[in-house]
Image (spheres, helix red, strand yellow):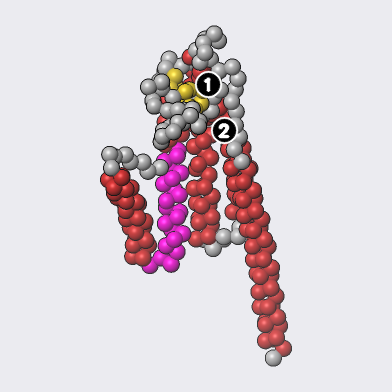
Amino acid sequence: MLSFGSDELWPSLLNIAIALAVIALLVCLLVWNGRRRGSRTIALDAALTLSGWWILLSAVSAVIFIVKAFAVDWAELHGETHVYVAWPADLPCAEFGDSGTTMLTCSGESLSAFTVGNASLGLRLLAAAAQLSSLALTTMPAVIVAVICFYTLRGRAFSRTVTRTLASAAVAVLLLGVAADLLSGIAATAGLREAFSPGSPWYPSAYQLTVTPLPFAAALGLAALAAVFRQGMRLQREQERLQQETERLQKDTEGLV
């Protein structure tokens, strides 16, 4: 994610443009290197390289999450909770429909991103599990692209390995997506319950758990893609069989002549 802040609009847009230019430069370097080597699969080579970097960075992040769970005494939590935080009292706002001028409507939001200091080992491990599940979910696209590019470059795009990878990825995305949503909410509520006593107004009375439809949609799309590759594999086998029969008939004809 690219994020920049400034007092004016244009400096932020300029920073975004510079970051995008750096990314474009890296892609151009990959394309140039492929052309220099005479490669005819530059897009596949670039996609395989970038996905490999993505997977490597995710592996490093996973190690950091695991080490941090045991090395520090605090836990970073990101998840919906049943604790509602109103806006500060000194923030000018009005109730809905009560203002005759342009003014904010008073509101608030649930406490969803915070850090608990002196957290127990159990809470730190729970937070790490939530982070790891989210990390694994966001790494799945890189794994899928890497497998498809790897086998396509070797002339086996419609192989059984690619089809099984897509089917397995569909199951993994569904399970990891649901786990990430649930673990984030459970860890956040557990963190507040550890930080506050039951008599505190900030003590969450219930768990606020949410499961988004995105993992189900992504899993369905991957399952459909696996079916497409399976059909392609079947057509490729039929084409190879027809080619073998054609070659056999040509040899028989040459023998008769």
Image point 42% across, 17% down: which residue? 117
Query: Which residue is the site of mark 1?
Result: 83
Query: Which quadrant of the view contains residue 189?
Result: top right
For the question of whether residue 133 can be seen, the reply is: yes
Residue numbers of the magenta segment: 38-59
Image point 58% across, 42% down: which residue? 214
Q: Are marks 1 and 2 in contact (CB under 8 Å)?
A: no
User: How much space separates mark 1 and mark 2, taking CA atoms?
Assistant: 17 Å
Q: Amino acid at mark 2?
A: Asp
Q: Secondary structure at mark 2?
A: helix
Q: Secondary structure at mark 1?
A: loop
Image point 57% across, 33% down: which residue? 181
The numbered dot on residue 181 is: 2
Percent x, y for residue 133?
A: 53, 34
Q: Let me know if residue 29 is in the magenta part.
A: no
Percent x, y for residue 205?
A: 59, 17
Percent x, y for residue 234?
A: 68, 62
126 and 20: which one is in front? 20
Image point 69% across, 68% down: which residue? 238
37 and 169: which one is in front? 169
